[in-house]
Image: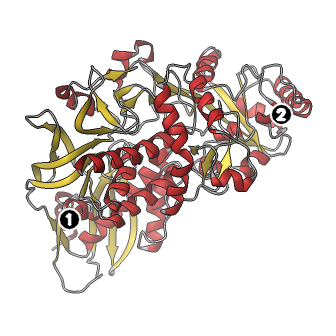
């Protein structure tokens, strides 16, 4: 068989081995020799952040001699990450030991999955899709993001048969891109670090940050369960031993991996592994098309569309953890017209599918027009610069080279202030001291997002702003830090560094759609409520698909808290309902 024919066969078999396992595919080896690679060119694909990522590998003399990404629709930030992984694979001939690039985890994993698929084809393996068939379980969960995986881990560990359905080709949803951390108060980690905090302070900060539009009962429950949730996550393998401060919080309460590493890329694999270990069945590329309603009005299962065909899962309880609608521009604009044309930080699966599915149950929705923009997103590519960079000391300047707003203001205030500047963008500026304090920054460095200079004057020249004005701003800020008195209102506790240690760094930033705070109405048991405030039997929801927790503005660190706390509560409530 010549290489052209092999390539055509490979194109027809664009399945990923990793997905095959989750969907019940059966692999058949064409040759008995395990691991033997046949010469030729092979193509395979996997689902990336914005669409299929297609790779091509060439095998000569039984070894991989080259590999490349031949098609992708990823962000400008993620494109170099995809190529780097392909280049590393060319040298190694395996994906083992190749780490995902920080800030581009979804794309990195897609490239690695596609490369494994191409290797399988080179070994002569083919995959056959088993026809889907109807089945039953105790609890079916829609979505394998942070809320869904948390619920799956908890419910499966309590002995229930759990099926998780994820329409995308990998787990994680928006959670895998979360960088800041998880807010929690009165935790064992805070106590060990000597950080004084209180549940009451956390509650007040969240209510104030949300302009008191939040449901206080939901907020109170989240706050009271936060410390126990941190301990629970640590017990299943999470590292939340570093605690930082985010905008809107009066104390350090944002828990994250050691050194300030991104929380999502760490937490999702931990939760996925824990869920599988507990016995949960996680199925990728499996889109839920409807939630089934029994004659008594209860939720009793779902309809699923998969590569193996459409099928029905009958369940005793349904947990909706499908995320928000930040990647559905038409839906966003229908609720908030002034966001037309805005970019988004959301992964492409955040399209709000579940809202139509719960209509038949009379499920109530709340605050759907409360849509948050994140102020520090790289224009044009959707890459979010974590709020922790500001929390660790960075400032923001406009094109004149001056500060214009207290950098630790809430996201809505910062977004509005930036949009009022020339060009509707600004520059996030920090020094080597800040970089060394936060591991998450290394991902921005590796992917070429930062402008770097040895001096503030040189940095200003590279940015195209007045060197004299910018240098004066930096000198003035160092004096402000020393005095502890900022004319713009940044608190002394929010100015940990004077920004005097070269080299210096900057990245252009502007607002983009980040979080949809409105959604399905739930109570403190994560039960879905109808318009009369009554719980819909057997139907639960958690995460960004719900509304009322964050009010008119979400504080950084509260999303990961929300999804983990209410994901766990939803599982506990569903288990109790079944009993």
Whether residue 443 sits left or right of residue 144 in the image: it is right
Asked whether the beta carbons under mark 2 and mark 1 sit within 8 Å of each other, the answer is: no
Q: Is residue 417 above or below residue 490?
A: above
Q: Position of residue 295 (x, y in %)?
A: 7, 34
Real-space Cα separation, disc 2 to disc 1, in angstroms: 56 Å
Whether residue 500 sits left or right of residue 88 in the image: it is right
Label 1 CA crowd tier, 10 Å (few <14, some 14–19, many 20+): few
- Relative to the observer, which residue lies in front, 565 or 497? 565
What SS does tag 1 mark?
Answer: helix
Q: Residue at x 62, y 20 (%)?
A: 413
Q: Position of residue 485 (x, y in %)?
A: 87, 25
Whether residue 106 sits left or right of residue 182 in the image: it is left
Mark 2 or 1, nearer chain start:
1
- Identify the residue under disc 1: 4
Q: In which quadrant of the rendered view does residue 204 lie?
A: top right
Q: Which mark is residue 487?
A: none
Q: In which quadrant of the rendered view does residue 378 lie?
A: top right
Q: Position of residue 8 (x, y in %)?
A: 18, 61
Q: Residue at x 40, y 38 (%)?
A: 543
What SS does tag 2 mark?
Answer: helix
- Identify the residue under disc 2: 457
Label 2 CA crowd tier, 10 Å (few <14, some 14–19, many 20+): some
- State the scheme by which the image is colored: secondary structure
Q: Residue at x 13, y 61 (%)?
A: 129
Q: Nearer the viewer, mark 2 or mark 1?
A: 2
């Amino acid at each position: 068989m010549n290489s052209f024919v092999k390539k055509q066969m490979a194109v027809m078999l664009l399945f990923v081995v990793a997905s095959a396992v989750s969907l019940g595919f059966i692999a058949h080896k064409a040759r008995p020799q395990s691991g033997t690679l046949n010469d030729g060119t092979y193509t395979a694909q996997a689902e990336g952040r914005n669409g299929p990522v297609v790779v091509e590998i060439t095998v000569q003399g039984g070894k991989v001699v080259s590999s490349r990404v031949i098609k992708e629709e990823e962000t400008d930030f993620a494109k170099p990450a995809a190529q780097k992984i392909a280049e590393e694979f060319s040298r190694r001939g395996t994906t083992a030991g190749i780490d995902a690039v920080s800030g581009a985890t979804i794309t990195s994993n897609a490239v690695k999955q596609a490369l494994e698929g191409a290797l399988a084809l080179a070994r002569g393996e083919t995959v056959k899709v088993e026809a889907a068939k109807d089945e039953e379980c105790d609890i079916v969960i829609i979505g394998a993001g942070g809320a869904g995986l948390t619920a799956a881990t908890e419910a499966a560990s309590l002995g229930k048969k759990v099926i998780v359905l994820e329409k995308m080709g990998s787990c994680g949803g928006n959670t895998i891109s979360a960088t800041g951390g998880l807010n929690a108060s009165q935790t064992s980690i805070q106590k060990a670090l000597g950080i004084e905090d209180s549940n009451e302070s956390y509650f007040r900060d969240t209510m104030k940050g949300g302009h008191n539009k939040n449901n206080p009962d939901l907020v109170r429950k989240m706050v009271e369960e936060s410390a126990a949730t941190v301990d629970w996550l640590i017990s299943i393998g999470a590292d939340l031993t570093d605690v930082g401060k985010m905008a809107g919080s009066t104390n350090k309460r944002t828990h994250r991996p050691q050194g300030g590493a991104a929380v999502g890329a760490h937490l999702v694999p931990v939760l996925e592994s824990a869920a599988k270990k507990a016995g949960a069945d996680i199925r990728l590329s499996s889109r839920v098309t409807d939630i089934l309603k029994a004659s008594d009005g209860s939720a009793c299962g779902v309809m699923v569309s998969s590569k193996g065909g459409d099928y029905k899962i009958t369940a005793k309880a349904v947990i909706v953890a499908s995320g928000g609608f930040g990647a559905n521009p038409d839906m966003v604009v229908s609720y908030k017209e002034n966001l037309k044309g805005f970019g988004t930080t959301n992964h492409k699966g955040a399209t709000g599918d579940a809202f139509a599915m719960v209509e038949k149950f009379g499920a109530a929705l709340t605050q759907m027009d409360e849509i948050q923009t994140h102020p520090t997103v790289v224009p044009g590519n959707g890459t979010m610069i974590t709020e922790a960079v500001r929390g660790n000391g960075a400032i923001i300047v406009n094109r004149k080279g001056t500060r214009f707003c207290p950098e630790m203001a809430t996201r809505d205030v910062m977004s509005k202030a930036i949009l009022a500047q020339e060009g509707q963008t600004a520059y996030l500026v920090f020094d080597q001291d800040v970089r060394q304090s936060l591991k998450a920054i290394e991902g921005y460095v590796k992917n070429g997002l930062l402008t770097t200079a040895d001096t503030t004057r040189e940095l200003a020249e590279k940015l195209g702003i007045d060197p004299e004005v910018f240098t004066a701003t930096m000198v003035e800020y160092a004096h402000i830090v020393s005095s502890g008195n900022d004319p713009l209102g940044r608190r002394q506790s929010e100015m940990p560094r004077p920004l005097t240690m070269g080299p210096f760094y900057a990245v252009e930033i502007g607002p983009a759609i980040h979080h949809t705070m409105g959604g399905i109405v739930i109570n403190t048991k994560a039960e879905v409520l109808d318009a009369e405030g009554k719980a819909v039997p057997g139907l639960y929801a958690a995460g960004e698909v719900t509304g009322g927790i964050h009010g008119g503005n979400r504080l950084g660190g509260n999303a990961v808290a929300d999804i983990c706390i209410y994901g766990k509560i939803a599982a506990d409530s569903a288990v109790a309902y079944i009993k």
